[in-house]
Amino acid sequence: MSALPWFVAAWLFGVGLYGLATSRHAVHLVGCLTVCQSATYVLLLGLGFVDGAGPPIFYDHPPGTPAVDPIVQALVLTDIVVGAAVSALLLAIAVQVQKRRHTLDPQALRPLRPPDSAPERSSR
């Protein structure tokens, strides 16, 4: 087994983590989170790779022929679908924040106050 997938996954995760730590835009944060998640794809595919093995289609292979584990491929596909759904949800939240707060800078957003703790206005 090669160490290349481990290095690529670590590099992707590090780049995404650096982007998460230094970003000042919500859409950029979602993109950096997607880069971090792509490290899991590379890592899972690197773990499931078997040198010299064929695809996991067994109807035309003689018994004893090495094949790649289909479970790892299914996990990667599931990871991609979940990542796309999470990214879509986070981008929808970013659109709503932009509409209501007129900024996508996480540091410029102040916490919302509950309606009960809002200062009362005196009627003059």
Image (tube, rainbow, N blue to C red):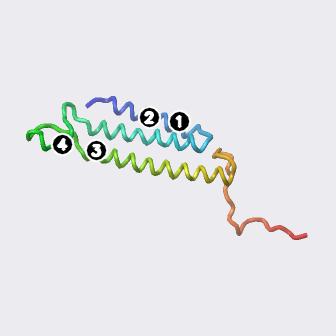
Ranked by sequence position, the earlier of labels 2 and 4 is 2
User: Does dot 3 land on a helix, a strand or a loop?
Assistant: helix
Spatial CA distance of label 1 from label 4 is 40 Å
Compare residues 13 and 99 and report the one nearer the observer: 99
Mark 3 touches mark 2? (CB < 8 Å): no
Residue positioned most to the left: 63
> Is 33 drawn above or below residue 116 in the view shown?
above
The residue where tag 1 is placed is 18
User: Does dot 1 land on a helix, a strand or a loop?
Assistant: helix
Ranked by sequence position, the earlier of labels 3 and 4 is 4
The residue where tag 2 is placed is 12
The kind of residue on which mark 2 rests is: Leu
Label disc, if present, on residue 57 of the rendered structure: 4
Q: What's the residue at 66%, 52% (across, down)? A: 99
Label 3 or label 4, whichever lies nearer to me, is 4
Residue positioned most to the front: 60
Spatial CA distance of label 1 from label 2 is 10 Å
Residue 86 locus on image (x, y percent): 47, 51
Compare residues 104 and 2 and report the one nearer the observer: 104
The residue where tag 3 is placed is 72
Ranked by sequence position, the earlier of labels 3 and 2 is 2
Q: What's the residue at 21%, 31% (across, down)? A: 51
Q: What's the residue at 71%, 69% (across, down)? A: 116
Label 3 or label 1, whichever lies nearer to me, is 3
> Is 116 drawn above or below residue 52 in the view shown?
below
Ranked by sequence position, the earlier of labels 3 and 1 is 1
State which quarter of the image contains the C terminus: bottom right
User: Does dot 2 land on a helix, a strand or a loop?
Assistant: helix
The kind of residue on which mark 3 rests is: Val
Spatial CA distance of label 3 from label 4 is 14 Å
Residue 118 locus on image (x, y percent): 74, 65
The kind of residue on which mark 1 rests is: Tyr
